[in-house]
Image (cartoon, rainbow, N blue to C red):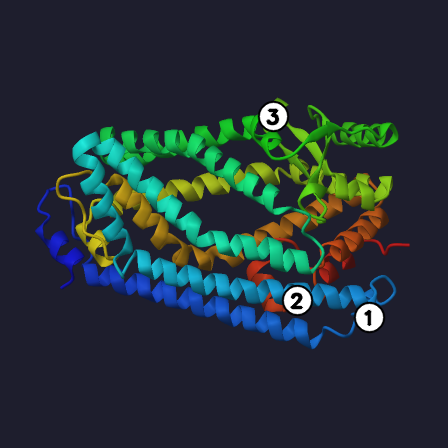
């Protein structure tokens, strides 16, 4: 029996139950981890083989609109991304094993607890544990983020960030995460300590309120920390967009252009905010690439998501899933065998709330991975509905032309593996999406 299991066996507090043995939790976790890792590798290998096999031949449906050079670039970019994803998955799996069954979290907890708890108390110890874990995780992921930006994106001509801008974003993101995350973590920990067996219900309510407030604050407080937003200066386009929004019964606080070209050549448009704080945001790269009619069609697609209440449905789904997850955590946190089975000795003279949060956050992804295709399927269905709405409110041929340009500009492969699509893609592949639209002139 390991150190964590021996320590857990000594926990006699009546708050703990033993619904499953420590070895049972270990076996269940290892099974999910191995199955998710193997599935990811299998899907990645299918995608690599399929894209490489079709690299040199533009699909007949796109022969007149996509050049062989653009098609090969999209294939090479996809292959580079998938292979990088395999490396990142292998590293993440190794790190997860290190944190759990190999004792990393147990060692970190003992170190932080012994250093902080006797001097500063329980809350400071728990916040320090969460902070130390987040810091180490960020350091481990930093080389991957650098490579993604300055090797893959740079090689294919998408990166426009300088190293100084990348570092500035890193510092601002870290400080912002600390400013937002620390108070939220302190609130959740206080709720866990004071609310008894139903703490998870109160914590969920606080989390929902926090997210809704964040949606209101994001457009005017958070996003401007990273990008510049200027009112849409093209009067003719602004008039056209305003007319579209009036036809669709949609109100927004303003039309803005974001300096996305400072960081990337990728193009996009989106809505942000909640209620009266909603904004329409265009990347400057999008406006530089599309005609006014194509911009209108892309915006009509986004309005289709609101018309069909996709945003509200997705938020409700996220909130429902988070409630179920917190309820499960509320049950698991009272079982010593849950801690021991994942390589951690529960504290005997300090609260285990932060430890339970971290352990649950580590253990959940291998299980949640298998819900991915269900969420992806629902998202693809929403995209088709939004496309149909755009065709009713704008010119479907403009939408088709815009999608072709965006697929080419973003180097999206035209020949993905069908099973890979069904498992991962939140948007339908170009061949399926364009087949449902009027043919571009």
Asked whether residue 338 is in view, the answer is yes
Residue, x 28% and y 55% (percent of image)? 104
Q: Is residue 133 above or below residue 68?
A: above
Numbered label attached to residue 220: 3
The numbered mark, 3 or 1, whose residue comes first in the sequence reads 1
Q: CA distance from mark 1 to mark 2?
A: 15 Å
Figure quadrant of the C terminus: bottom right
Q: Nearer the viewer, mark 3 or mark 1?
A: 3
Numbered label attached to residue 60: 1
Position of residue 107 measured from the top left corner of the image (x, y, whole percent):
23, 52
Residue 165 location, quadrant: top right
Q: Is residue 6 above or below residue 299?
A: below
Position of residue 281 measured from the top left corner of the image (x, y, whole percent):
70, 34
Farthest residue in the right direction?
A: 441
Residue, x 19% and y 59% (percent of image)? 22
Position of residue 65 in the picture relative to residue 252 (left or right):
right
């Amino acid at each position: 029996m390991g150190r964590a299991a021996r320590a857990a066996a000594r926990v006699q507090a009546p708050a703990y139950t033993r619904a499953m043995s420590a070895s049972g939790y270990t076996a269940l976790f290892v099974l999910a981890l191995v199955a998710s890792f193997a599935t990811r590798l299998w899907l990645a290998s299918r995608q690599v083989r399929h894209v490489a096999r079709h690299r040199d031949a533009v699909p007949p449906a796109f022969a007149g609109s996509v050049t062989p050079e653009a098609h090969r670039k999209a294939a090479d970019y996809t292959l580079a991304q998938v292979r990088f994803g395999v490396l990142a998955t292998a590293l993440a799996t190794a790190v997860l094993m290190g944190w759990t069954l190999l004792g990393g979290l147990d060692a970190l907890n003992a170190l932080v607890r012994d250093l902080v708890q006797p001097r500063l108390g329980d809350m400071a110890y728990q916040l320090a544990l969460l902070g130390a874990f987040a810091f180490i995780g960020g350091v481990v992921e930093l080389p991957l983020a650098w490579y993604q930006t300055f090797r893959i994106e740079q090689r294919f001509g998408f990166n426009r960030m300088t190293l100084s801008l990348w570092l500035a974003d890193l510092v601002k993101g870290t400080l912002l995460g600390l400013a937002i995350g620390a108070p939220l973590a302190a609130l959740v920990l206080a709720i866990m300590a004071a609310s008894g067996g139903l703490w998870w219900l109160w914590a969920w309510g606080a989390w929902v309120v926090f997210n809704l407030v964040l949606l209101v604050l994001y457009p005017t407080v958070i996003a401007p920390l990273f990008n510049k937003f200027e009112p849409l200066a093209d009067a003719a386009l602004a008039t056209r967009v305003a007319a579209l929004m009036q036809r669709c019964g949609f109100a927004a606080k303003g039309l803005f252009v974001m300096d996305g070209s400072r960081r990337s050549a990728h193009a996009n448009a989106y809505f942000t905010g909640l209620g009266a704080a909603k904004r329409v945001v265009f990347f400057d790269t999008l406006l530089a690439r599309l005609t006014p009619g194509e911009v209108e069609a892309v915006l009509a697609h986004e309005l289709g998501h609101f018309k069909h209440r996709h945003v509200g449905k997705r938020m409700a789904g996220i909130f429902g899933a988070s409630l179920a997850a917190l309820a499960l955590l509320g049950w698991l946190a009272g079982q010593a065998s849950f801690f021991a089975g994942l390589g951690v000795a529960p504290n005997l003279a300090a609260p285990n709330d932060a430890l339970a949060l971290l352990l649950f956050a580590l253990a959940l992804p291998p299980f949640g991975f298998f819900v991915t295709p269900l969420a992806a399927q629902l998202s693809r269905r929403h995209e088709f509905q939004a496309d149909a709405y755009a065709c009713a409110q704008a010119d479907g041929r403009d939408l088709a032309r815009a999608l072709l340009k965006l697929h080419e500009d973003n180097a999206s492969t035209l020949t993905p593996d069908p099973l890979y699509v069904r498992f991962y893609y939140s948007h339908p592949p170009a061949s399926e999406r364009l087949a449902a639209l009027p043919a571009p002139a």
